[in-house]
Amino acid sequence: MAAIPFENLDVLLGRGIRLDLASVTAKLVTARRGGYCFEHGTLFQAALRALGIAATAHAARVLLVAPRPRRRAPTCS
């Protein structure tokens, strides 16, 4: 995080995010900019693979959903 911080300016400005390794390397390493989570993952996966470590990419999403109200169980009288 100290070397390549999180940055989502391109997302907020409506710019597309390119995830090919050349584009990610140009942005995060060459241009010394921060990156979006998928850009970090792409670069980290490439670094692991360069070290001979088998790395598999996974994607996840945070869903902010309001909790459903709990229904009370019927009571017997």
Image (cartoon, grey):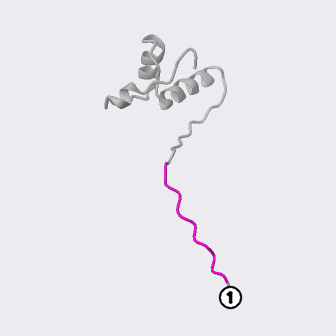
Residue projecting furthest to the left: 14
The amino acid type found where label 1 is placed reads Ser
Q: Which percent across, then down, holds residue 48?
A: 62, 24
Q: Residue at x 56, y 39 (%)?
A: 58
Question: Please, what secondary structure does the residue beneath circle 1 have?
Answer: loop
Q: In the displayed structure, does residue 76 sit left or right of residue 12?
A: right
Of 6 and 76, which appears nearest the observer? Answer: 76
75 above or below 60? below
Dominant SS of magenta comes to loop
Of 59 and 67, which appears nearest the observer? Answer: 67
Q: In the displayed structure, does residue 64 sit left or right of residue 72?
A: left
Q: Quadrant of residue 53?
A: top right
Q: How many marks can you see?
A: 1
**Residue 69 shown in magenta:** yes
Residue projecting furthest to the bottom: 77
Residue projecting furthest to the front: 77
Q: Residue at x 47, y 19 (%)?
A: 34
Q: Residue at x 62, y 32 (%)?
A: 55
Q: Which percent across, then down, holds residue 76?
A: 68, 86
The C terminus, quarter of image: bottom right
**Residue 29 shown in magenta:** no
19 above or below 33? below
The N terminus, quarter of image: top right
- Category of crowding for the residue at label 1, using alpha-carbon neighbours closer than 10 angstroms: few (below 14), some (14–19), many (at least 20): few
The residue at which mark 1 appears reads as: 77
Q: Which percent across, then down, holds residue 46?
A: 56, 24
Q: Residue at x 41, y 21 (%)?
A: 23
49 above or below 73? above
Q: Which percent across, then down, holds residue 68?
A: 52, 62
Q: Which residues, given as a range, are shown in magenta?
A: 64-75
